[in-house]
Amino acid sequence: MKTMTLKNSAIAAVLLVALGGGAWQVWGGASAATASSTPVPALGVVVTTPTRITWPQTLQATGTLSAWQEAVIGAETGSLRITELLVDVGSRVRRGQLLARLADDALQAQLQKQQAAVAQARAGLVQAQMNLQRAGAVDGSGALSSQQVDDYRIAEATNRATLASAEADLLATRIQLAQTRILAVDDGIVSSRSAVLGNVVPAGTELFRLVRQGKVEWRAELAARQLAQVKPGQAARITLASGRSLAGTVRLVAPTLSTSTGRALVYVSLPDDGEAQPGLFASGSIEGPATPALTLPQAALVPRDGRQDVFVLKDDGTVTRRTVSVGRRVGDRVEILGGLKEGSRVVAGGGAFLSEGSTVEVAQAGAAPDTSSTSQQGTRP
């Protein structure tokens, strides 16, 4: 009897397990079917289309700031000692301003000697002229021979030449004396001073350098293919290391290219406000003629792995990725050079959350671009 009871209990347990497993399968299948039938929510996006805007063509460049022209001031007379220095590096000077003095004691003495020589030659000439005058008065009377008269004429001419020579020597001494005063040859800023007080300098020794008229220019380096877009008179803008921006004007385009770099220099005149200093490095841009640009909002670009992508909306409500090439940037818009057709519907923002084939829901159309940006300056990335 006990044995039968155990057998009935075992059979009941088996049936219970079987029934439970079937119920579990029925419940699990129903849950899976319910989950698979739930729709995946679409991401709401704003869609825009590329817009053509006229933008200035700009060329990005780098270069150094240099003096427009330098003036070298040296000693014109030699073996004289520097007795006085009146300016230093950074001093603003005017044309003809006294910069330094050289010792002039010996030249002062020589000047007095030459003045005496001139006075002596002038007296000799006066005497020769009087002798010639008296000889002319008695000429033909037989008191003087023709040879004696000729001697008086020769003596007068000789004394006249002696006076001219003495006056020339006097003038040379005065010039040398004037050269002991070192003067500025133009308005400008003293950029270098090699003169040392008390030093004896030979003729031709450099004493000062001037930045002529205080003018500084930016010498931008451009590739050969860019030179055709640059003409004198075009506007330019540079950014200094301090962060300050300066406006300039293209003065000259170099007629030759560097044989080592294959690049040419463009000389840009800058305002004389003391901010730009020779030797500084600066980056900037040169503005060329305005050209139309196909543009998108900056937010539409998705940078990935060194490239720029956009997501284009298809007719079935999904998006596809497109890699584009970009150019100028003005404000919050960027020029699209290739990889996108005009009229394409582009996701204007949130592209970082999308992937190829994602389903999206258009929330609203993108706002029209601000046409006032056409007057801004474009830049290359």
Image: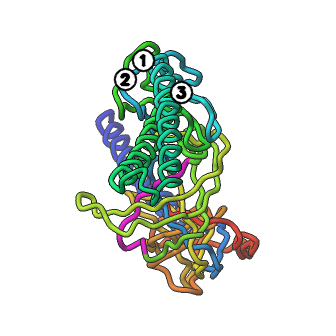
In this rendering, would 239 be left or right of 20?
A: right
In this rendering, is residue 269 above or below 181?
below
**Disc number for residue 81:** 1
In this orientation, does residue 192 appear? no
Between 209 and 46, the one nearer to me in the picture? 209
Q: Are marks 2 and 3 in contact (CB under 8 Å)?
A: no
The residue that mark 2 highlights is 201
**Disc number for residue 89:** 3
Q: What stretch of residues is rendered in magenta?
A: 216-227
| Colour mode of the rendering | rainbow
Q: Earlier in the sequence, mark 1 or mark 3?
A: 1
In this rendering, is residue 128 above or below 35?
above
Question: Residue 279 location in percent, x, y?
Answer: 46, 39
Q: Are marks 2 and 1 in contact (CB under 8 Å)?
A: yes
| Separation of residues labelled 1 and 3 (CA atoms) | 21 Å
Q: Residues within 10 Å of mark 2 (few under 14, many from 20)?
A: many
